[in-house]
Amino acid sequence: MHKPPPTMVGVPNVTRADAAAAVRNPLAFIAARWTPTPRTVQRAALAALVMSVVIVVTGGAVRLTGSGLGCPTWPKCTADSLTATREMGLHGVIEFGNRLLAYVLCAAVGWAIIAARSEKPRRRSLIRLGWAQFWLVMGNAVLGGIVVLVGLNPYTVAAHFLLSSVLIAVATVMWRRTQEGDEAPRPLVGKVVQQLVWVLVGVTAALIAVGTVVTGTGPHAGDSSEVPRMDLPMGMTWEDVSKVHAVLAWIVVTLTFALWFVLKSADAPKSPLNRTRDLFLILLAQGAIGYVQYFTDLPEVLVGAHMFGSCLVWIGAVLVLLSLRERGPLAQADDVSAPTQAYAATSASMAGPR
C-alpha cells in the first residue's frame, strides 16, 4: 500500500481574485488583511523619524571625512559601476554607505505609510503625512544627486540639509499625531502664548538656516580637494557668520526660558510645560557643544555631534508647538471581524467581473 502524500497545512488559499487585488492596489490589499495596533503605528512613525535623523548625521559624516565625492557621479557610484570599487578606498565606502542608508529610510517611510493605511478606523491625516515624507525623500534623493554632479556646491549642500529639516518636521508631526485622536484641536494655552511659540519656531528655523551658511563658509568642505565656499556680502567672514549664529541661538534660548516661565506662572498643563523644559535642556547642551567646537578649531567629532543636536533642537521646537493643543484620545479600533469583512469587499470590488 502506498501512503498518500502529506498535505500542506496552514498555507493560505490565494485565489485569482486575491492576486489581482494585490497587484492593482497592494496597500488596500494589505490593509484589508492586517490591522496594526496603535502602538505598531506609533513605532512605524517613530522609525521614520529616527531614520530621517540618522540620514542627516551620516550625511554629515560623509562631509566631515572628506568623502563627499567618494562616488564622483550619480545615480551610479562611478561611470562604470553602481557600487563603490576597491580602488576608491574608504571615501567610496563611506559615500556609498550613506546612499544605501537612503534605501533604509525609504523602507522606514514605507512601513509608516503601510501601517497608517492599515489602521482602523482609517486616519487620512496620517496617510497624507506618510506620503508627504515619501515625496520629500524622493526630492532630497534627486537633490543629493545634483549636489554630487555640481561638485558639492555649498548652496546645493545647504538646500539638501534644509530639505532634510523639512522631512524631520513632517516626520515629527506624524509621530505626534499617532499618539492622539482626530477631534478638532482644542487650545491649551492663550493666544499670546501661541504667538510666542510661533516666534520661537520661526527663530529656530532661522538659526538652522544660518547654520548652513556657517557650514558653507567654514573649513569642512566635504571633499579632500578644494571646494568653493559661499560668497558672503559686505566683506563678512566665517567668524562673523558664526557670531550671528550664536546670537540667534541665544535668542532661541531666551525665548524658550521666557515661554517656560510664562507657562509655569500660568499653571499651564504639563504637556507644553514639559516639552518646553525638554527643549531648553537640549538647547543648553547644543550651545555647550557649539562653543567648545568653536574654540577648539572645529574637531570633526564635535561638529558631527552639533549636527545631531541641531536635529534634536528642531524636533524639540516642533513638539513644543504641537503640545499647545489637544485632539482627544485615540479612537478604538473596529471589532476583529471588520478586517475580514473589508478584505472580502475589497477583493470583490477590485477583482471585477469574471
Image (tube, grey):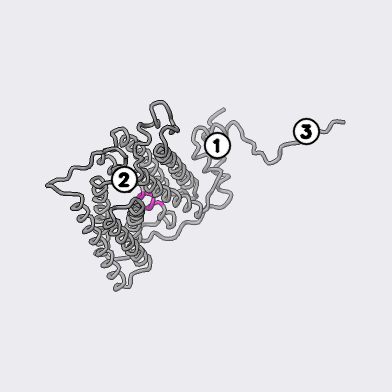
Nearest the camera: 257 or 40? 257
Taking the image as shown, residue 9 lies to the left or right of residue 205, namely: right
Taking the image as shown, residue 34 lies to the left or right of residue 59, namely: right
Nearest the camera: 49 or 186? 49
Name the amino acid, label 2.
Answer: Phe
Q: Which residue is mark 2?
A: 161
Residue sitting at x 44%, y 39%: 100
- Give the crowd class for mark 1: few <14, some 14-19, many >=20 residues within 10 Å: many
Q: Which residue is mark 3?
A: 5
Question: Residue 169: within the magenta?
Answer: yes
Give x and y (percent) for residue 220. 29, 46
Quarter of the view holding residue 1: top right
Nearer the observer: mark 2 or 3; the answer is 2
Tell me which label, 2 or 3, sits earlier in the chain.
3
Question: Residue 25: within the magenta?
Answer: no
Segment tinted magenta in the rendering: 168-174
Nearer the observer: mark 2 or 1; the answer is 2
Residue sitting at x 47%, y 49%: 44
Q: Which mark is residue 133?
A: none
Q: Which residue is mark 1?
A: 347
User: Dot 3: what SS?
Assistant: loop
Does the residue at mark 2 contact the one at mark 3 (Cβ under 8 Å)? no
For marks 1 and 3, give the CA distance: 32 Å
Image quarter of the C terminus: top right
Tell me which label, 2 or 1, sits earlier in the chain.
2
Give x and y (percent) for residue 91. 39, 39
